[in-house]
Amino acid sequence: MNKTIVSHSEWVEARKALLAKEKAFTRLRDELSQQRRELPREKVDNNYVFDGPDGAISLSDLFGGRSQLIIYHFMYGPDWEAGCKSCSFLADHFNPAIVHLNHRDVSFVAVSRAPLDILERFRKRMGWDFSWVSSERNDFNRDYNVSFSEEEVERGDAYYNYRNKGFPSTEAPGASVFFKDEDGSIYHTYSVYERGLDMFITAYHYLDIVPKGRNENDLSYTMEWLRLHDEYGNQAETPCH
């Protein structure tokens, strides 16, 4: 944090210099977003069936009559006591955006391996109402590289973010995008993991403009400070297993 104190005119000059870099970054981000949209797509031949509040629901049905679908891979293992606090941090941002996504031909669903009744209890506790289904009975999480065996975790060779880099848990976060054409064929168009998920966290963008920033450098790991939103002020912490 810079504690240098300057005159107003000096501050404006420093701000304008940074503004030039911000504008260059914005143009670069627009270019990158265009390249993301222009990625080739791969056909999804497995019409996965999930457990939803109204019974079994297929991947095709998750589109809800729209042509585009974003799935958030929420870290919640079958035997976990609660959902990952970092994924919960992201999930706190979902509800306000979904109505706007729906009006741009986009559906949004969270998927976890925990049984549906466990997901429903946790969702009620957190006050969320976004669509959340269980992949407990299919290989969806495995196929999209966000669930690993205990052996892979122990060996440190779990395939995550497109390389065998290992992961400290049997569940990992991510987001995947799918498109359904007029004949009902489904295509995988994009997946993102790790720091690529930062762009979904509005609170981080606010922290990035204040003097102390995210203030995570002295922590043992980023997001160590996080709590489930109903646990702030409580010493108990819900870890990502």
Image: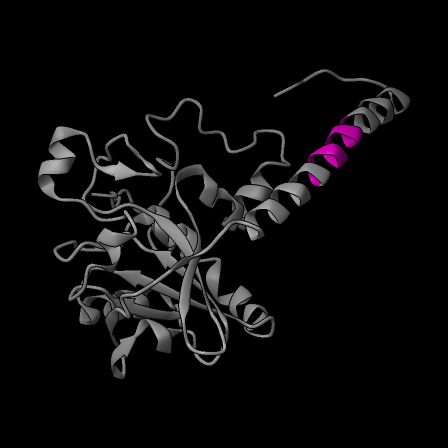
* Residue at 47% from the left image edge and 61% from the top image edge: 94
Toward the viewer: 193 or 18? 193
Give percent across and percent down for residue 8.
Answer: 87, 25
Dominant secondary structure of the residues highlighted in magenta in the image: helix
**Residue furthest bottom as drawn:** 54
Q: Is residue 101 above or below residue 235?
A: below
- Taking the image as shown, residue 166 lies to the left or right of residue 227, namely left
The region drawn magenta spans 18-26
* Residue at 23% from the left image edge and 47% from the top image edge: 171
Give percent across and percent down for residue 189.
Answer: 46, 56
Quadrant for the C terminus in the image: top left
Residue 212 lies in quadrant: top right
Quadrant for the N terminus in the image: top right
Give percent across and percent down for residue 135.
Answer: 22, 64
Residue 31 lies in quadrant: top right
Residue 160 lies in quadrant: top left
- Taking the image as shown, residue 31 lies to the left or right of residue 184, namely right
Q: Is residue 53 above or below residue 239?
A: below
Give percent across and percent down for residue 15.
Answer: 80, 28
Q: Is residue 162 above or below residue 39?
A: above
Q: Is residue 109 above or below residue 92?
A: below
**Residue furthest right as drawn:** 9
Tell me if residue 73 is in the magenta stretch.
no
Toward the viewer: 98 or 223? 98
- Taking the image as shown, residue 39 lies to the left or right of residue 88, namely right
What colouring method underlies this structural image?
one colour
The mark total stands at: 0
* Residue at 19% from the left image edge and 66% from the top image edge: 118
* Residue at 51% from the left image edge and 33% from the top image edge: 214
